[in-house]
Structures are given as structure tokens and as C-alpha cells.
Amino acid sequence: MSERTPEIVLIGNEESTDLTLLDLIDHVLNTGVIIRGNMVLSLGGVDLVYLGLDLIVSSVETALRSMAKAQPPASVATKRRPTS
């Protein structure tokens, strides 16, 4: 499988290069953002604490739209192969 590269999206209107907080929040809620991070605290080569963070920020409408795209059509999901 090929690895997906992150997309860089410029937001805001083209007439002005100023980006307002409202433009940023609107873009994040319309497209969604995933933030991932890991941190390990170790002492003397011994890992003591592992912290992991997976955060998804999105609007409910965007999340439902993404889930609908990921699900197969209802006719495919309900068909089952006969067992022998």
C-alpha cells in the first residue's frame, strides 16, 4: 500500500492574506483534524511513563458524512453467503 502524504490546505478568502480565528475554526470543523502524539519518560534507560494522545476534532455533521462514505451500501451489507 502506498503511504498517504498530508495535504496542505490554505484557507481564507483570496482578497486578503489575513486569517481570522473564525476562518480557522470553520475550516477545522468542516474538514476535521487528527492530532497524534507520544511521549515516554525514562530514567537510566528504563521507561517509567508512556503517554499517548489521539485527538479528533470535527463537527458532528462532518463525522457523520465521513462515516457514511466509509460504510458499504445497505444492499451489500445485508447480503450474506449461505453456509454449508
Image (cartoon, helix red, strand yellow):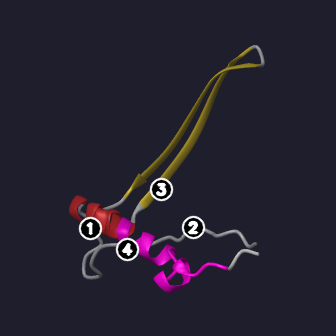
Q: Position of residue 35 (x, y in %)?
A: 49, 51
Q: Is residue 41 above or below residue 9?
A: above
Q: Nearer the viewer, mark 1 or mark 3?
A: 3
- Give the residues drawn in magenta, as a range: 63-81
Q: Nearer the viewer, mark 2 or mark 3?
A: 3
Name the amino acid type tagged 1.
Asp
Using the image, tell me which numbered label, if any, was put on residue 6: 2
Name the amino acid type tagged 3.
Ile
Q: Which quarter of the image is occupied by the N terminus?
A: bottom right
Residue position for label 3: 34
Q: How much space separates mark 2 and mark 1, taking CA atoms?
A: 23 Å
The answer to which image quadrant residue 62 occupies is bottom left
Q: How much space separates mark 4 and mark 2, taking CA atoms?
A: 20 Å
Q: Nearer the viewer, residue 23 or 67?
A: 67
Using the image, tell me which numbered label, if any, was put on residue 65: 4
Badge 4, how many Cα within 10 Å: few under 14, some, many 20+? few
Residue position for label 1: 18
Look at 38% across and 65% down and name the residue there.
63
Name the amino acid type tagged 4.
Arg
Look at 30% across and 63% down and name the residue there.
60
Q: Nearer the viewer, mark 4 or mark 3?
A: 4
Q: How much space separates mark 2 and mark 3, taking CA atoms?
A: 11 Å
Q: Position of residue 2 (x, y in %)?
A: 73, 73
